[in-house]
Image (cartoon, rainbow, N blue to C red):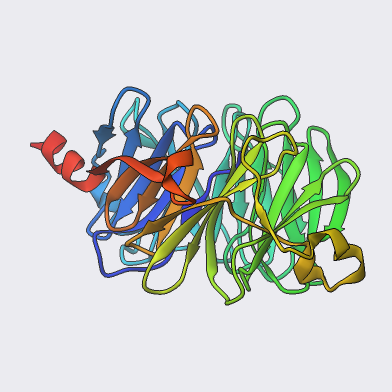
Amino acid sequence: AAAAAATAATTRKSCYVAFNQDCSRFVATSLEKGYITCSFQDGLDVSQPNVSQAGKLKIAEILAATGLVAIVGDGSKPDFPENKLFVWSEDTRSFVIELEFKATVEAVRLSERRLIVVTARKIHVYSLVGQPELQFSLDTAENPDGVCAVLGGDDMRLAYPVEPHGTVKIDALEPHQTICQVTAHTSALRAMCFNCAGTLLATASVKGTCIRVYDVQTRALLRELRRGTEAAVIRSLNFSPDSARLVVSSDKDTYGTVHVFSVADDDAYQNQKSSLFGLRSLLPGFFSSEWSFAQYRSKDPRCVAAFVNDNRHFLVVSCDGMVTLCMVDEKSEGMCREVWTKSFLAAAAAAAE
């Protein structure tokens, strides 16, 4: 699945967190300098490479299990402006790639063979085998949040917003060709992600009230998932490894909520539905929506969430430096259970001593 990121500026110690492609690691930037990487297959393994020369970072993205990290500075250091991308190798402890763009870099995505750089009106796709080579550039809708979704592996795909607002275009990358185009929402897009097989695409708009799940092959709308009735910022979308569930994190200013939805008909847990769901073909679209069957409340609204290992356990990583492992629990009456909570900032500080 595509990496998910919380990018809101903050006065606390961490300002950006993002999972890698298989959700086995995450990277977080610190307001002071550099970034922190954390893996959690066998507990919480934290490291903080010394890239202090870059100063404060706007973006950091890590490539799967490799030691490559793409970073973009926030402009506070003259050598690391917001229109320059650097790739740091943790193996050689040096920058191995440097690319400059005409516009500010809004997002970066990495896959095994591609480096994807998003600006407000363009997406640039580079080969990541050897020295980076520009393959092609794509025009997008106005995209200040750098929204896109990337599927790695043998069947590489890219989903991105195009005009008119709310429209998603899905391209194959090897070779480059358009697969389909979907009118997903009536307002601008805020988040999207593929499932692991690339057969499903979940999308959310800037309104943040509903998430839609589409069949990539047929373009059919499979599910309309209702987060709420009031606007909120969708921070992340991620499918479970078996594609049976979707975890969604949202920001309501003073707190964050993580919703867990079922997207499979044979799931043991099913979403909540209106009592008039059976008449949905005769009623407004609201009555076709489904509500999450489980939730988790985060103290920090700027959080991202992703399933780990199965469709019952997921991690919530927040910009205040906390990471929580949660579990869907039939005994918790719609609320997910905390398995453990740890501070990755404290762990990084302890590892540096």
Q: Nearer the viewer, residue 330 or 225?
A: 330
Q: Which image quarter holds the N terminus?
A: top right
Q: Is residue 336 above or below residue 91?
A: below
Report the front residue among 324 and 7.
Answer: 324
**Image coordinates for residue 274, horizontal then vertical, percent:** 72, 63
Left or right: 137 as drawn, with respect to 81: right
Q: How many marks?
A: 0
Q: Position of residue 243 (x, y in %)?
A: 67, 35
> Could you tell whether 169 is left or right of 240 in the image?
right
The x, y position of residue 265, in whole percent, is 75, 39
Picture residue at 86% right of the left edge, 54% below the top: 181
Question: In x, y percent, where is residue 127?
Answer: 65, 35
Query: Image height check: is 270 above or below 33?
Result: above
Q: Which residue is pictured at 31% across the width and 62% down the height? A: 77
Res 52 visible: yes
Quadrant location of the C terminus in the rendered image: top left
**Residue at figure coordinates x 75%, y 70% from the top left:** 286
Q: Is residue 95 left or right of residue 226?
A: left
Quadrant housing residue 256: bottom left
Q: Residue at x 75, y 42 (%)?
A: 200
